[in-house]
Amino acid sequence: MIRIRLRRRGTHTEHLFATFRRFLWEVLFPIRRHIMAVIALMLVVSSVVLVLNQRLPFPSPGESILLDPTDWSLLFHRDPPLPARPDMRSPGPSIGGSTFVQPPLAILLYRAHAGDTMSGIATKLGMDIDTISSMNRVEGRGVHNVTVGETLRIPSQNGITLTLAPDFDGQCRTYGVSPEDVLAANALSRAQLWTGMRLFFPGVQHTGYARSLAVGVGVALPIHGWESSPYGWRADPFTGQRSHHSGVDLAAPEGSPIKSATDGVVIAAGYDGMLGNYVEVRAQLGYSYVYGHMSTILARDGARVATGSLLGLVGHTGYATGPHLHFEVRLNGVPQNPRNYLPGIR
Ligand SMILES: [Zn+2]
């Protein structure tokens, strides 16, 4: 009865409803599993993107890729600090005494080409080299080596990246910057901070030895020599077996002067089966530098040395095939690649 009455009345709405029901049952229902699968896949992909976005410290606001390296200076612009506006002032007391609203950090990606240096790029942009090196190197490691095609991060304002300490407010006080400004620059809230993450500290620059390392003058060449064996895995010069070389070998004639690469204190001067006559100089920030295979040691244990002070003469004492300086950079006792610290070694 009902069906007959519906058909007889046959309103437009009822026709639409019937079509929709047919669409549901005849088109969508048979492919329901596919639809569920697509929805599930979209959910998984979006959660992965969200998680990655949280973990990466610097896909912060406004990161963009510079497509044409020849025109980068046109694409790049530095926003001057915005004047303070009562409705936009960051809340709470400002320790750094800032009178402007901290703009969020924007990062452009710059692809290095032949002849580029970290300091050259900084100069062209009118930025502090600390800023460029800090954004792309940790404590100035590898400031000297910009490789062609390497992508460098260029921040929109001066400042340095630091590892977040457990006491965020204390760390901000140490560097004379307000926590609100740091949070604003990184477009983060306090709840999103985690100890150990890298954060951009706007307007902050390195001081002391950290600055020397950041601008690439923390370590001077200890000798006029040529790199005869690089740092890293190599065939042992005596046995031919694969072994790790913890320093760089700089070959020079026997008796050539070896000069201290940094200011510091001699913490060891003696003989070692492998290093031969060697000297270790401790610098700041946990760095020490080792000079091996000397023919003669000319530095006293415990002596203060300056960059360029004579430490000894080139020889081939210890585990060495010919006269050369074995030079090591140690950070908290762990050998680092000297290539990342020394100028003129590529
Ligand atoms: Zn060596």
Image (cartoon, rainbow, N blue to C red):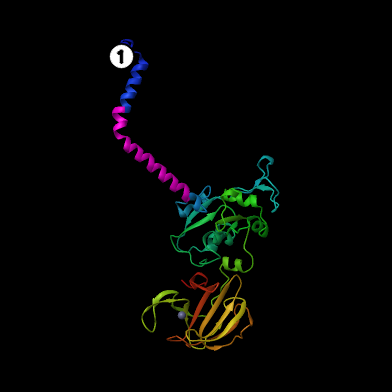
254 magenta-colored: no
Residue wearing tag 1: 3
Where residue 333 sits, quadrant-wise, is bottom right
Q: Position of residue 227 (x, y in %)?
A: 45, 77
- Quarter of the image holding residue 215? bottom right
Mark 1 secondary-structure assignment: helix
Residue name at image x 30 percent, y 13 percent: 7
x, y percent for residue 261: 57, 77
**Compared to 94, does 308 lie above or below?**
below
The answer to whether residue 254 is left or right of residue 176 is: left
For residue 32, say whether it is visible: yes
Comparing 165 with 235, the one in front is 165
**To which quarter of the image does residue 40 belong?**
top left
Q: Who's the residue at 41% across and 45% down the image?
A: 44
User: Which of the pair 89/174 is nearer the observer?
Assistant: 174
Q: Compared with residue 200, is residue 233 higher up or lower down, i.e. above or below?
A: below
Q: Residues within 10 Å of mark 1 (few under 14, many from 20)?
A: few
Where residue 342 appears, as percent x and y from the top left, is 52, 72
- What stretch of residues is rendered in magenta? 25-52
Q: Position of residue 273 (x, y in %)?
A: 48, 86
Drawn side of residue 181 relative to residue 110, left or right: right
Q: Is residue 222 visible?
A: no
Tell me the amino acid under the disc marked 1: Arg
Quick check: 302 left or right of 46? right
Magenta: main secondary structure equals helix
Q: How many marks?
A: 1
